[in-house]
Image (spheres, coloured by chain):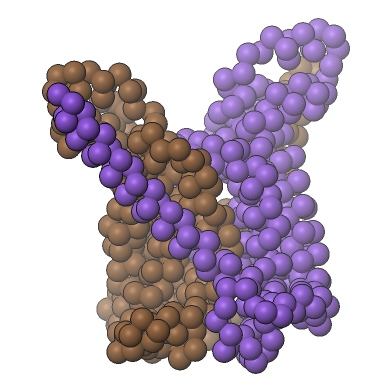
Chain colours: A brown, B purple
Amino acid sequence: MVKRWYTLTNYLFILPALLLFLVFGLYPFFKVFQLSLMSWDGISSNMQFVGLANFVEVFTQDKVWWGSVLNAAWITFLALTIQNGIALILALLCANDIKGGHVYRVIFYLPPVLSGIVIGLIWKWIFRYPDGILNVALVHMGLKHLVRDWLADPKTALNAVAAVHMWRGFGWGFVIFLAGLQNIPQQIYEAARVDGANAWQRFWYITVPLMIPVFILVSILTILGSMQIYDIIAATTNGGPGYHTEVPVTRILASMQGAGRFGYACAQGIAFGLILLTVSMLQLWVSNKMKRE
Amino acid sequence: MMSETLFYRLQRFVKLSLSYLILTAVALSCLFPLWWMFVSALKTKISVFKDMSLWPAQQHWENFYYAWTKGGFGQYFLNSLFYTVVVVTAIVLFSSLAAYAFSRLEFPFKNFFYILLIASMMIPIPGAFIALFVLLKMLGLVNTRIGYILPQINMGLPFAIFLLKTFFDKLPRDLEDAARIDGCSRLGIWLHVALPLARPALAVVIIFNTLMVWNEYLLAMLILQDKAKMPLPRGLMVFQGVHLVDYPLLMAGMTITVVPVIIVYLLMQRHIIKGITAGALTGQ
């Protein structure tokens, strides 16, 4: 009896964490599903059950919503290709006996540790029309035809936001790539060199295959991070001009705060969550497969 | 033979110089926007639009004073500091207690609870903040400090528990056994043996969550309307909405926001970079 009581007191160790999780993690999780079936403005006591109507609207009528998903997907695509490409090239340059490689690493990793709001506001200031430093510099370089309101011009707004996002993110990919490269034993390269493999062959037949798990990891985390982009948008365009830089998180907020449609916002959140969950599952599946090999 | 080694040397020289050139160019592109923010904070409301110099002839350091006082950034700064200290301390305490229990103690449904906590890390629910807002409203915690603190503790817990449990699992038990024989209680072992040994993992937990809380914006935007309770990122957005033209003060506020992070980062960069890499790789 005493022994059992003693065992039960072990629960006290996990109690604070569990309590917080039940109230602020698990309850909202189920509440989202419940609310997604309701029509509710978030204030009145009048909550109406509407079945799957919110989901039907999300999937069949809400063009702005799917436009925002496409915008985030475009930013994600650019991050996967350009941002991670730059990160990999820089990591390869640094992995080659570069003196002061450590200094570069410290500098490249600076933007990822800073507030997204501050980064967004800095770039909004740089992109300012017509007196921001970017436009002024373009005039000085004789490229006057390029001067524009980068964040308000429908043609450039999304790519400008994506550029800020990539500026912030590449250092993170760089650090992971560099750690991956430094994990490859040097003897393998030495052996290949002795066998007469040139630099390109060493890269293609040694570096690339050994780095595949790292590539996959970085890609998945890039997708999850880029799809959920919010801070930078909030500080630069807030979704504008028109709907040109709307992303899923800004749309969910607009449904909730702007339109006062809490149920509908939850349905959007679940639809978006399903997209992200698919990516996460893909990650688990791939990394499990890797581990077995 | 001679010319061949010369050729290789030349090739190596060109390759190295090119590498340095590219790396330095990218490094400058990382630093320039931050420098531009800082020098813009030293100009006047008028000169900030005209003076494109990288170091103004006259530096208006008083802008930082005005940002701190008139701009309200002193208040925002203290709020941010308060939230960060409270949330990170709570995460360290609660996660290390739970991780120690999951690793060393026995109780019914242990694995069930562990998997429940960890699964919440894996499942992304971008809509959860709507329900969280509804919950806080129900509890009367909207626009309160505690309403901003509790959800953030919860957000940091799963990863911290996962990291610490993995760390405890790898630790030898000899020291704890010795302490137990000496009559140390479970709580005493956690405090005097487990926590000091877990310092490397705790450092990662602290660094991760400090950055997370200091830079948090979405939740602050949703639930804090009172300027006296706002953290820095939220305060910056409010400031730029109200004082559309006072760029030097805005830039000073932004500098105030990032300087503590940069200082901590430069002091601890080795641990931070190692921690981030370890964090990402354990996520595998």
Res A62 quadrant in image: bottom left
Q: Looking at the picture, how far across and down is residue B98, in whole percent? A: 67, 35
Position in image of residue B137 (x %, y %): 69, 72
A160 and B279: which one is in front?
Answer: A160
Residue depicted at x 32% and y 49%? B18
Q: Quadrant of residue A224?
A: bottom left
- A188, above or below B183, in the image: below
* Residue at 60% over, 47% down: B208
Nearest to the observer: residue A201 or residue B124: A201
Q: Nearer the viewer, residue B216 or A264?
A: B216
Return the x and y of residue B148 as percentages of the image width and height: 71, 64
**Looking at the image, which residue is at 28% across and 37% down?**
B12
Instruction: Please indicate, yes or no, whether residue B66 appears anywhere in the rendered image.
Output: yes
- Name of the residue lying farthest toward the right: B183
Is B234 rendered above or below residue B157? below
Looking at the figure, which quarter contains the N terminus of chain B? top left
Toward the front, the furthest residue is B2
